[in-house]
Amino acid sequence: MKIGRFRKLRNLDWLGSVWRITTVNPFVKYFDVKKQKLMETHIAPFPEELALRLITLYSKRRDYVLDPFCGSGTTNYVALSLKRKTIGYDLEQKYIDMARQRCGGRGMFICKGSENMKEVYSNSMQLCVTSPPYLNLRKYSNNPKNIGNHKDPYPALKKVFKEVYRVLKPRGHFCLNVAGAPDGKGNCHRFPFDMIYLCQEIGFRFKTTIIWDKGITLREWNIENNKPNENHEYVWVMEK
Ligand SMILES: C[S@@+](CC[C@H](N)C(=O)[O-])C[C@H]1O[C@@H](n2cnc3c(N)ncnc32)[C@H](O)[C@@H]1O
């Protein structure tokens, strides 16, 4: 049995398809010792551990890792700490500033919509790890161009994913983190599953699903009504 490569993994649980990782509380501010003040954080970050596992599994040292919706730069920060090179896009200057500061000036950050990533060569990225904005789940800004504010985010997301496809190397991976969303009528939106179809239309091969188990957060409502609370998100793993 070839175990050399897996010795580098912290835990063989990574090779299972359900990952229990505590979620990040977006409302916790952090104290910047240099500036002596509490700093704002992003409103929808994913945990470093999620990015760490995906980057370790799907890339190697010196590879390029992209996040077209980099927010506070979690993917980029972890990529750098694992000795990868990294590029991040975000429409909002405040998030680009956050990501730059977090990465200590390393990595390349571009403040513009990732529907067009002409700064990046075709077939140059090994991996893309991202979580998209959608369906007004979070208010990132008042900018109508922000996909989080689009009534119908599908066309813009398709443009971004087409660009991801272009810049990925053949056999490079695209890890897309999406969560279930209420549709406003008491039902679940099929958005996460539509993303699989959308990526397949572009040409991606759908390789595997990772369920990110965020741990149980029950509200009184769940207990009183005997109704489960959704405590997971998906990571769709696609290949070019
Ligand atoms: C779910 S958040 C990403 C959070 C990130 N994973 C983190 O850990 O901080 C999605 C981000 O996409 C950005 N965004 C929205 N529309 C965009 C666009 N057209 N191009 C690039 N970024 C965009 C939002 O401003 C937001 O920061």
Image: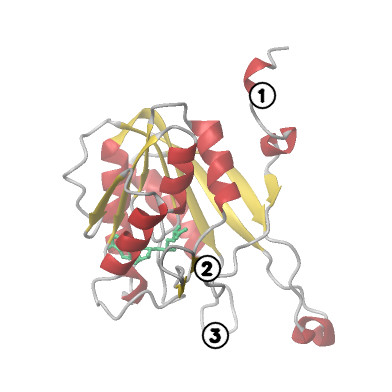
The chosen color scheme is secondary structure
For disc 1, the marked residue is 6
In the rendered image, the vertical position of residue 166 relative to residue 91, given as above or below: above
Left or right of 108 on screen, residue 172: right
Question: Which residue is labeled 2 in the image?
Answer: 30
Q: Which amino acid does label 3 sit on?
A: Lys
Q: Earlier in the sequence, mark 2 or mark 3?
A: 2
Give the residue number, with chain letter if any, for mark 3: 185
For the residue pair 84 and 203, the one nearer the viewer reads as 84
User: Which quarter of the picture shows residue 179?
Assistant: bottom right
Element at badge 1?
Answer: helix
Label 3, residues with CA under 10 Å away: few <14, some 14-19, many ≥20: few
Quadrant where the N terminus lies?
A: top right
Q: Give the mark nearest the N terminus, 2 or 1.
A: 1
> In the displayed structure, would residue 48 be above or below residue 43?
above
Residue 195 relative to residue 54: left or right: left
On screen, residue 180 above or below 104: below
Q: Looking at the figure, which quarter contains the C terminus? A: top left
Q: How far apart are marks 2 and 3 (CA)?
A: 37 Å
Where residue 203 sits: x, y (%)? 35, 39
Task: Kindly identify the amino acid type of the residue bearing the numbered disc 1.
Answer: Phe
Residue at (26, 46) in percent of width and height: 163
Density class for disc 1 (Cα within 10 Å; few <14, some 14-19, many ≥20) is: few
Compared with 113, 240 (above or below) is: above
Q: Which residue is drawn at 83% across and 87% down?
A: 224
Q: Nearer the viewer, residue 238 or 201?
A: 238
Label 3 secondary element: loop
Look at 54% across and 34% down and name the residue there.
56
Q: Where is residue 72 in the image (x, y as percent from the top left)?
A: 41, 60
The crowd level at tag 2 (other Cα within 10 Å; few <14, some 14-19, many 20+) is few
